[in-house]
Image: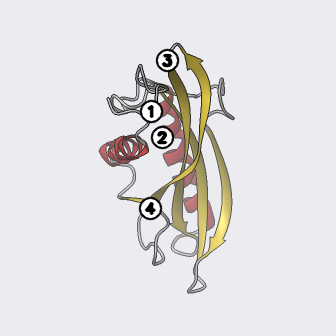
């Protein structure tokens, strides 16, 4: 396992989301153009923190935001809310369980031992072309083990 590899953790989370089949479009970073059609997910790194020193290694938390987008005017408001709530509920259930996020991630800090925990917040976002989106930011704190010897210079 490579020490502190955010790329591997993001790739594992991207693959995890794509493998669930509930979200048709998953990408790293904010979309450059307004998403269309189905729910779209963008993964963005929010922070990296050292949370524990264990012998000659440090454990870290990679806090990743999964932003879900759904066109606000594509369907009625009730349908949009229900669809996003169902996707978020299923996603959080999947992450609560035995989510296999590869060797680089020990666990999701669901209950907030080292972070604010697994959480979701709804908002509205207007894109550059004036299109309004209903969004949900799902905060996913990933606990990452450091390699032995990673603190040695």
User: Disc 3 designates what residue?
Assistant: 56
Mark 3 or mark 4, whichever is nearer to me: 3
Question: Is residue 131 depicted above or below 70 in this figure?
Answer: below
- Element under disc 1: helix
Quarter of the picture containing the N terminus is top left
The answer to which of 65 and 131 lies nearer the viewer is 65
Residue 16: x, y in percent?
Answer: 35, 41
Question: Is residue 82 depicted above or below 115 in this figure?
Answer: below
Q: CA distance from mark 1 to mark 2?
A: 5 Å
Q: CA distance from mark 3 to mark 1?
A: 32 Å
Sequence-wise, the earlier of marks 2 and 3 is 3
Q: Residue at the location (52% across, 57% down)?
A: 68
Neighbour tally class for label 1: few under 14, some 14-19, many 20 plus, Cα within 10 Å: some
User: Disc 1 designates what residue?
Assistant: 94
Neighbour tally class for label 2: few under 14, some 14-19, many 20 plus, Cα within 10 Å: some
- Element under disc 2: helix
- Asked whether the residues under the numbered discs 4 and 1 touch, taking CB atoms below 8 Å apart as contact, a structural biologist would say no
User: Disc 2 designates what residue?
Assistant: 91
Q: CA distance from mark 2 to mark 4?
A: 14 Å
User: Disc 4 designates what residue?
Assistant: 40
Count of numbered marks: 4
Q: Residue at the location (67% across, 55% down)?
A: 122
- Asked whether the residues under the numbered discs 1 and 2 touch, taking CB atoms below 8 Å apart as contact, a structural biologist would say yes
Q: CA distance from mark 2 to mark 3?
A: 35 Å
Neighbour tally class for label 4: few under 14, some 14-19, many 20 plus, Cα within 10 Å: many
Q: Residue at the location (52% across, 63% down)?
A: 69
Mark 2 or mark 3, whichever is nearer to me: 3
Sequence-wise, the earlier of marks 3 and 4 is 4
């Amino acid at each position: 396992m490579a020490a502190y590899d955010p790329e591997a953790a993001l790739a594992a989370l991207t693959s995890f989301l794509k493998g669930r089949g509930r979200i048709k479009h998953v990408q790293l970073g904010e979309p450059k153009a307004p998403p269309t059609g189905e729910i779209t997910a963008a993964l963005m790194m929010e922070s990296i923190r050292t949370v524990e020193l264990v012998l000659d290694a440090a454990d870290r938390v990679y806090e990743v935001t999964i932003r879900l987008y759904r066109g606000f005017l594509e369907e009625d408001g009730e349908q949009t809310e229900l669809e996003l709530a169902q996707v978020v509920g299923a996603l959080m259930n999947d992450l609560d369980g035995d989510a296999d996020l590869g060797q680089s991630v020990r666990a999701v800090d669901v209950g907030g031992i080292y972070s604010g925990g697994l959480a979701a917040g709804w908002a509205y976002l207007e894109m550059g072309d004036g299109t309004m989106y209903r969004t949900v930011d799902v905060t996913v704190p990933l606990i990452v083990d450091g390699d032995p010897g990673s603190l040695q210079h």
